[in-house]
Amino acid sequence: MSGVLVIAEQRRGELRPVSLELISAAQGLQGAEGGTVTVAILANSPHLFLDSLKLAGVDEIVTVKVAAAEFDPDTFETAVGALIEARKPGVVLVAHSVDSFGYAAALAAKLKLGFATDVFKAEYIDGTLVATRGGYGQKVNVEVDFPGRDTVLLAIRANVYKPPDQPGDPRISEFAAPATASRSGGRDFIELSSNDDVDMTAAEFILTIGRGIGEETNVAQFKELADAVGATLGCSRPIADAGWLPKSRQVGQSGKTASSCKLYIAMGVSGAIQHLAGMKHVSTIVAVNSDAGASIFNVAKYGVVGDIFEIAEELRRLF
Amino acid sequence: MSRTDAVTRILFEAFPTAEVRLFYALGYTAIGIFCWGVYVQIRKYRRGTALALEGSLWSRAGDMVGKVLSHRTVNRRDHAAGGAHRLIFYGFVLLFLGTATITLQYDILEPLFGIRFWQGQFYLIFSLVLDIAGIALLVGLLYMMYRRGWMKLPKLDYARTDRALGDPDFLRPEYRREDWAFLWTLVIIGCTGFLLEAARLVWLHVQPQAWDTRWWSPVGAAVAEALEAVGLTAHGGGVLRLSLWWFHGLLALTFIALIPFTKVKHIFTSAASLMVRDPKAAQRLTRIPATQQTPGVAKITDFTWKQLLNLDACTKCGRCHEACPARAVGAPLSPRDVILSLREFANAALESGSLPPEAELGVHGKAPGQVAMETLWSCRTCMACVEICPVAVEHVPIIVQMRRKLVEDGAMDPLLTKTLQTIHKTGNSFGESKRKRGSWSKALPFKVKDARKEPVDLLWFVGDYASFDPRNQKVTQTFATLLHEAGVDFGILYDGESNAGNDVRRVGEEGLYEVLAESNIASLAGATFKSIVTTDPHSYNTILNEYPDFGGKYPIQHYTSLLKQLFTDGKLKVTRPLTLKTTFHDPCHLGRFNKGYEAPRDVLKLLGCELIDMKRCRDNSFCCGAGGGRIWIPDPVGAEKPAQNRMREAAAIPGLEVYVVSCPKDLTMFEDALKTTGNEGKFVVKELIELVREAVSAPQTLAVPA
Amino acid sequence: MKILIAVKQVAALDEDFEIREDGRDVEEEFLIRDLNEWDDYSLEEAVKIKEASSEPVEVVVMSVAPEEADEVLRKCLAKGADRAIRIWDDGLEGSDPIAIARVLAAAAKVEAPDMLFAGVQSSDQTFASTGIATAAFLGWPHAAVVSSLDYSPGAKSAVFRRELEGGLLQEVEIQCPAVLTIQLGINTPRYASLRSIKQAAAKPVEVRTFTDLNLSAGDVGESGSHSRIRRMYIPDKGQAQLIEGDAAAKARRLAEIIREFKGDAA
């Protein structure tokens, strides 16, 4: 078994960026004897995505036409399963995403594949495929391997690998997936709209508050501070779930990504992995937290260990 | 017969027998109605749950009689009302005893044994005393009328804080009507009594027995003179006397008959309530009985007979309403209205022949008579209400019992829910690992002994806030240093200590309290020590008063007494007297709960500070607002907090330099309030320990932590 | 009607934890155990369905875990579950999510529920796989990250929303019986008072071994797992430059950083 099979993701007619990150992750995993990197795109009209996938590092693009307009687990399990049986790759890469949550483990169970999720590093060490992921709430790193498994399925964490920046000229082929009787079907997509028309993805300077602010009555103080320093106020999931700020202000995996942000100040945010997913790429991160052991300090450029209210007050005075 | 021997008043003089009989019939009817009313009330109390009283009934009765006769509970914080009520009470009691004396002779001793004593000198003195009693009664009543009608006291304002204008039970005019009916009835009875006296004298002018001794009834005599002056004849007097006699008599009999149905029943219920009081009502809450299915109070019949009696004892004096810190900042809680609501409910539900169906007995909710969640959660369990109530109503246990039900149902603020889960998981309200409980001691230049591993003289129970809150940790470190300098052999329990549970219990999470108490008691059982000291008044209260119920009885003091002892014994010496202008905030759980007012004041004096007490001090100290779990419940946006209210009171002291506290929660709340009330820079908030540190210089060899 | 819920007792790391001698896990004494946060939500969802239904619905919680997990199973009983089942045996030691799923599926076949819920992931190992792998072994329709659910017990289909990246939701219809993994925030889990937890301690936890379920040693434990832990280690912490001083000094430095940034941006 050799070569890497990458399963790209698309939604609502757009290729999800993580698919390109997978291509970078695939480099070095081809294994012995000239294994290739093949990217599979499953869609109703897969040819629409070909151009975006013609990148350096891709040896072949396989288009798989499926009946379902959007993702559904049965379709993917049948199609990807068939592709794996046909191509027998050494490694299969999917994104560690909501879509793959819905089918990857089932596929691994059925086809007896080696399996690890939320992997942020994959490499061969002395001929053995080793994947590194987090453990105990991301407080430790865990290396796993897959003894006796010819094909290994890895779900790769988003925002770790950088997409390839050079164009490529891969071979294009088609794969006829067997028909699927899907037992579930996606209907409408719903965007959560709110009166608050802030666009976190466009903000360059964000001040985010987390569980550390304690009570809802304290939100006002930080809103004032954000206004005073000229930042857009954001929040982590618990604040939005509690309704203290609209969901549109939530930064994180199931919230918004701070894509345009250059300066990110996190106050009272512990740094749970889901939140980091939305902001750890920001070039300057300042973490303010009373807990010196908070995970947020691992991704921050500047750290302030102290009482967030005192510091917020002092900072407010200076603007 | 000599004049003085024979002088007496002939009862029913010139009454036809039929009228006398009618009077007796009416009298017995009135007594019958009275008895029926009493029966209905007692039946109502018996519909509550059982409760055994501690202590002997005799000592309780003696205590009650002492309180009633001295009126000291009515006198507190309102000497005018206390004085006026004394007049009413003694006046009424004497007048009643007077009538009873007459009945004793007329209906019992004379017909059965031929004994007559109500005559001669006795009769004359009797008449004088009763006249004075009548005056006392009227003066007291008139003051009360002035008080209710003109003084517009806030505590007598019946507008509810938990209802809005337009709600049916917002103003409760029926209370006002009853108050005035009560006052007027007694006034009229009193006045007609005097008029009656006067009318009889005019009627019997020709009888020297009556007329010559008239000045033994000075008021009656004066009025008689006045009546004659305006032309009342003897015959007219007779007619007036007869009609007044019946009017006065019927009014009095009606009054008596209606006692159990009106506010007047407080004569009995208040005294009874004083007799069955629990002197440690709010300091020591009670466990859930093993036989009880659901915890706390869900239905009106879940209250004990004593609590139902409490509801009837309330006279709407408003002292609790005035003292309550939640009410003072506009929260939807008035202890008075909790009691009155429940009273209305109890009366409606429990006074009929049969009990209504269970579904109608629920006391939680927003319907009239029920108590809303928001009301119950506003309570700080500071016990200002319980402490000041003249008739020993125990509001705090009632509120906690109702909270137990809310907790069981999960009807709590989400932050409170989370905090309880955190306390269960980590043993502290901060969510910090147990292992970090003693981390504050790492900064010290000496090692604090681990009381789990070696014996110590003094075991220091530190408490959550003192262990984990950064500001309070500084105080904790300072105290440790002082103990060390004083050569005290002390240690702490490190990870073996959990939240003492005082506030968890008062939130109503009794199950979690049991877990905490049992855990702490197990830790203490494994340690060897002579006594316990604590820097946290909440821990002090629960370990002192409540742990014994769980098998943990220890000698324990609050640090203020220990510091005083150390100074007295010379182990700590003041080397730099502080001449600061200070005020002291009595923490609820040390002061009002456990009468610990003096030690901190003595220490301040020893330090050389000038102490200016705030108006609301000692037993009337105004709670910082953090108790009863409120520190784990967000305050409504925009509302004043009790700590801010208190800061404004302190700020009014001219030249104040230091606001002194001796409780970790007080320190947190007041430092915050100092800033939010704009008083930062005018004076500072300091823990007493910090002042002691400033006044006692460290020995050369020891470095004081920054 | 029956709803089966797979729950897990997760472990969080205490202060100053240490890696075990064999380098493959953390020392036991530093593990603080509790019910997985996601399972609170899936249990609550099931209990809500039970309370809203006019037909009787049995809510059964199940966990593949050793005896110490009885504590969280009892907590579930206090929160409204009717029965609790625990499956364990030394041979299950070292099982990865797929091996666990094999056991769960075997037990689920015996219970024959109308729906099976699991949490999206566990807060300790965050595999996000066990529920869906169980569905594969059962051969049932499945979906992940359910953030709201509309289901009547015994119905042939259910409609739910799944929570996608970036705050997007998708409405999906699925055939039932199905396996759904439940996301945080789908409801507000009820509070279980200590008293109710103590009372639940009186209720039994049914214990099974994997042999009761007709599984062999090769299906479970390390041999039945699809991955193996080689090494666990504490990662190097990121280098955050710590700003020192009192609050005012820290604020001044922060203000500097902000002004610098704005100067660049201007």
Image (cartoon, coloured by chain):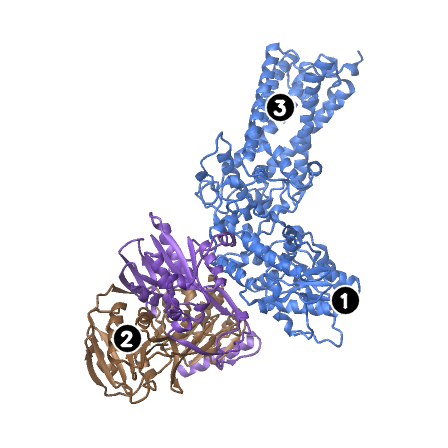
Query: Depth-wise, is mark 3 or mark 2 nearer the camera?
Result: 2
Task: Tell me the chain of label 3.
Answer: B
What color does chain C have in the rendering?
purple
Secondary structure under tag 3 reads helix
Along the line of sight, the residue nearer the viewer: A85 or B115: A85
Q: Disc 1 or 3, which lies upstream in sequence?
A: 3
Please say if B257 is above or below A96: above
Q: Position of residue C225 (x, y in %)?
A: 39, 73
Horizontal side, residue C158 vs residue C243: left or right:
left
Secondary structure under tag 1 reads loop
Secondary structure under tag 2 reads loop
Q: Is residue A319 visible?
A: no
Q: Position of residue A189 (x, y in %)?
A: 27, 65
Q: Are marks 3 and 2 on the same chain?
A: no
The brown chain is A
- The image's mark for residue B192 is 3
Horizontal side, residue B333 vs residue A103: left or right:
right
- Give the crowd class for mark 2: few <14, some 14-19, many >=20 residues within 10 Å: many
- Amino acid type of the residue tagged 2 in the rendering: Glu
Q: Position of residue B324 (x, y in %)?
A: 58, 49
Along the line of sight, the residue nearer the viewer: B569 or B574: B569
Along the line of sight, the residue nearer the viewer: C220 or B189: C220
Query: Depth-wise, is mark 1 or mark 3 nearer the camera?
Result: 1
- The image's mark for residue B572 is 1
What color does chain B have in the rendering?
blue
Along the line of sight, the residue nearer the viewer: B508 or B163: B508
Q: Which residue is mark 2?
A: A9
Circles 1 and 3: CB distance less than 8 Å? no
